[in-house]
Amino acid sequence: MKSPVRKMFDEIANRYDFLNHALSGCQDILWRRNCCRELKRVKPGKRLLDLCGGTGDFAATYEKFNGKPDVAVLGDFSYGMLKGAAGKKTSAVPVQLDAMKMPFADGSFDVILNGFGMRNLPNAEGGLRESARVLSEGGYLQVLEFFSPRNVFNKFFYKRLAPLFIPVLGAFFSKRDAYEYLVNSIIRFLPVADFVALAENNGFELVHVKPCFFGVAYRVLLRRKSVPAGGEA
Ligand SMILES: C[S@@+](CC[C@H](N)C(=O)[O-])C[C@H]1O[C@@H](n2cnc3c(N)ncnc32)[C@H](O)[C@@H]1O
């Protein structure tokens, strides 16, 4: 049976890109670019997974800055969102999958992108652990996400302002419920510091955390720890 989150993304898929750009004032494009430039600097290996990749914008941006990977997969559980990747400039092969239990062997990828996906998983810890499993040692996980607000400006924005206009725009162009869910999911999600701690307990070391637009979102670059002989990292 389809989960409510999967059903929701299937329903909003056709207006997803448009509203993403409109609600962020096209900042989301810049944020993905910055993520991909950062990955270029660390020179990851050549096997890419865009996880919770939706309509493929992150994979397409990655290829623009880093060239065509040897292996590229666009993984998402929403068929509607994956269909939205048709026509995007990416070589990533769409695969319908659950990020909590992926159909890949251990160490299959050198870099995983996760744009606005972690917050939508049943639990971030399971998603991090499964990402660590399919990453090679020393591989990178680049997370771009809206975390639970902690500073006064962002608390005011997400708790007072966003509920006034995001669901209204959602109702006008797409589905109101989905955009109410967006705001609530951000407030309910982990603060970025707690997310980093969770990642560090689940196979990753932190490379850096960078705020996007005064901390409205964050780029969290993580590196898969080496597995000590005879044990899990
Ligand atoms: C907010 S969209 C982000 C899409 C894209 N990464 C971007 O940067 O715009 C979140 C995506 O995560 C997917 N998703 C949520 N839970 C998932 C899961 N358990 N397994 C796979 N995909 C999931 C949704 O279908 C949706 O496409």
Image: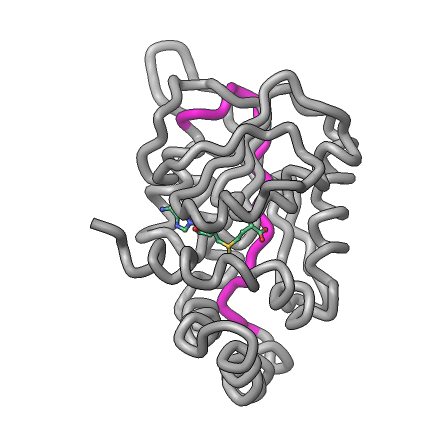
Q: In this view, does 101 lie to the left or right of 217?
A: left
Q: Where is residue 146 in the image (x, y as percent from the top left)?
A: 55, 62
Q: Where is residue 154 in the image (x, y as percent from the top left)?
A: 60, 77
Q: Where is residue 8 in the image (x, y as percent from the top left)?
A: 38, 62
Q: Nearer the viewer, residue 101 or 89?
A: 89
Question: For residue 93: magenta?
Answer: no
Considering every residue shown, the one lying at the far left of the view is 1
Quarter assignment of residue 17: bottom right
Task: State which region is magenta.
Answer: 133-150
Q: Which of 91 and 148 is in front in this view?
A: 91
Work out whether 23 lies above or below 204.
below
Q: How many marks?
A: 0
**In this rendering, does residue 155 appear at all?**
no
Which colour style is shown?
one colour
Q: Which residue is drawn at 64% across and 51% down?
A: 219
Q: Position of residue 96 (x, y in %)?
A: 40, 36
**In this rendering, does residue 44 appear at all?**
yes
Q: Residue at x 53, y 22 (%)?
A: 109
Q: Which residue is drawn at 34% across and 58% down?
A: 7
Q: Nearer the viewer, residue 37 or 211?
A: 37
